[in-house]
């Protein structure tokens, strides 16, 4: 089963920048894949299109078989997105932030409260449950973004540069957590510009440059050729 299927995806922004020049790749269910490439390569645009935050110019995108054109709600429900920038309300507490998110997906209050406890504990944020977002450290904010993305139990977790600007200790604990939830069945797609991060974490890799996929293979194969 394919978690994500992208065929001949193109994106030209209003300023005429061709961010994606017809990319195709797919992500199998249960996979852990890195989309690797330098700044400006088209990684965020790709993620933006998959999550319907950016309008594509042409091409096909399916999430667990649901086309983002004809079955947007079903496609969105499958996805948990961890954006690059913190975008939660600074004056809400950790618990409020994750419970509110679950509400957007129709999760009942009782279930949301239970899930919030489980997920905040897994991400070592339970002690901070009543702390406002603005008082959290950078690493805690990153973990809160992940917690929030998991509240509707998405089938695929998509993370845009999850460890950018994060120190090595926090990075390692995030890697551990992502590996664990992948083993438990969540498909994971992350963008990064560190080969080391892709190597540590991912089974497969797609390398993007100037809006084109230039490699799409297993991590093992890529490393053996370096
Ligand atoms: P579109 O409507 O083509 O999807 P957006 O609404 O995303 O484009 O962006 C509108 C405008 O914002 C762009 O035309 C551009 O001028 C500007 N812009 C935003 N982000 C960037 C960026 N990273 N690089 C260049 N221009 C940007
Ligand atoms: P990456 O995530 O790999 O750094 P992006 O997808 O952000 O790459 O950007 C790909 C290209 O599209 C870059 O040239 C960038 O400047 C341009 N771009 C990104 N967002 C916009 C936008 N909203 N409007 C115009 N150009 C953009």
Image: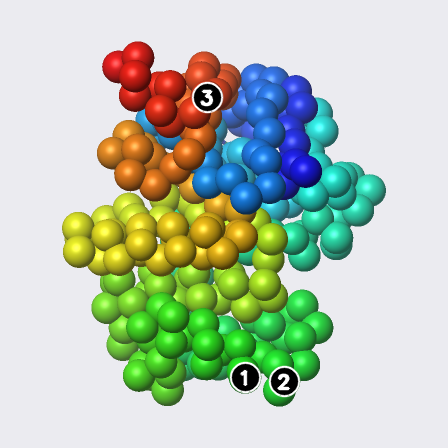
In percent of width and height, residue 51 lies at 60, 46
Q: CA distance from mark 1 to mark 3?
A: 40 Å
> Residue 217's mark?
3
* Residue 201: x %, y % from top left: 34, 41
Report the disc number at residue 113.
Answer: 1
Q: Is residue 113 visible?
A: yes
Q: Horizontal and vertical percent for residue 95?
A: 45, 81
- Residue annotated with mark 2: 109
Point out the image quarter for the N terminus: top right
Kindly report which numbered mark, 3 or 2, lies closer to the viewer in this rendering.
3
User: Residue 53: in sight, yes or no?
Assistant: no
Seen at 65% across and 53% down, the residue is 78
Between marks 1 and 2, how big is the CA–CA gap?
Answer: 6 Å
Dot 1 alpha-carbon crowd within 10 angstroms: few under 14, some 14 to 19, many 20 or more: some
Residue 223: image quadrant is top left
The residue tagged with tag 3: helix, strand or loop? strand
Please give the name of the residue rendered at 75% of the width and 54% of the height, measured from the top-left corner.
Answer: 73
The local crowd at label 3, few if under 14, some if 14 to 19, many if 20 or more residues have their Cα within 10 Å, is few
Above or below 25: residue 82: below
Residue at x-position 46% and y-position 76% = 118
Which numbered mark, 1 or 3, is in the foreground of this view?
A: 3
The reply to whether the residue tagged 3 has its Cβ within 8 angstroms of ligand 2 is no
Residue 216 percent coordinates (x, y): 48, 21
Q: Is mark 2 within 8 Å of ligand 1?
A: no
Q: Residues within 10 Å of mark 2 (few under 14, many from 20)?
A: few
Q: Are marks 1 and 3 in contact (CB under 8 Å)?
A: no
Residue 196 location, quadrant: top left
Residue drawn 38% across the image and 50% down it = 179
Residue 112 against residue 58 in the figure, above or below: below
Considering the image in quadrants, where does the C terminus appear?
A: top left
For the residues marked 3 and 2, what is the alpha-carbon distance in whole angstroms? 42 Å
């Amino acid at each position: 089963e394919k978690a994500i299927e992208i065929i001949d995806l193109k994106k030209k922004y209003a300023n005429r920048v061709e961010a994606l020049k017809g990319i195709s790749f797919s992500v199998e269910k249960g996979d852990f894949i890195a989309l690797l490439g330098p700044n400006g390569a088209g990684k965020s645009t790709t993620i933006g299109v998959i999550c319907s935050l950016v309008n594509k110019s042409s091409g096909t995108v399916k999430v667990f078989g649901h086309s983002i054109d004809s079955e947007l709600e079903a496609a969105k429900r499958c996805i948990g997105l961890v954006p690059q920038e913190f975008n939660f309300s600074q004056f809400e507490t950790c618990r409020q932030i994750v419970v509110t998110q679950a509400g957007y997906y129709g999760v009942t209050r009782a279930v949301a409260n239970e899930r919030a406890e489980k997920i905040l504990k897994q991400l070592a944020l339970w002690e901070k449950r009543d702390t406002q977002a603005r008082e959290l450290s950078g690493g805690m904010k990153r973990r809160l973004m992940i917690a929030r993305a998991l509240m509707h139990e998405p089938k695929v977790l998509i993370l845009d540069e999850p460890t950018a600007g994060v120190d090595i200790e926090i990075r390692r604990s995030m890697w551990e957590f992502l590996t664990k939830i992948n083993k438990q069945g969540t498909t994971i797609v992350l963008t990064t510009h560190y080969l080391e991060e892709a190597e540590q974490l991912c089974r497969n890799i797609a390398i993007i440059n100037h809006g084109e996929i230039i490699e799409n293979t297993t991590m093992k194969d890529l490393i053996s050729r370096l």
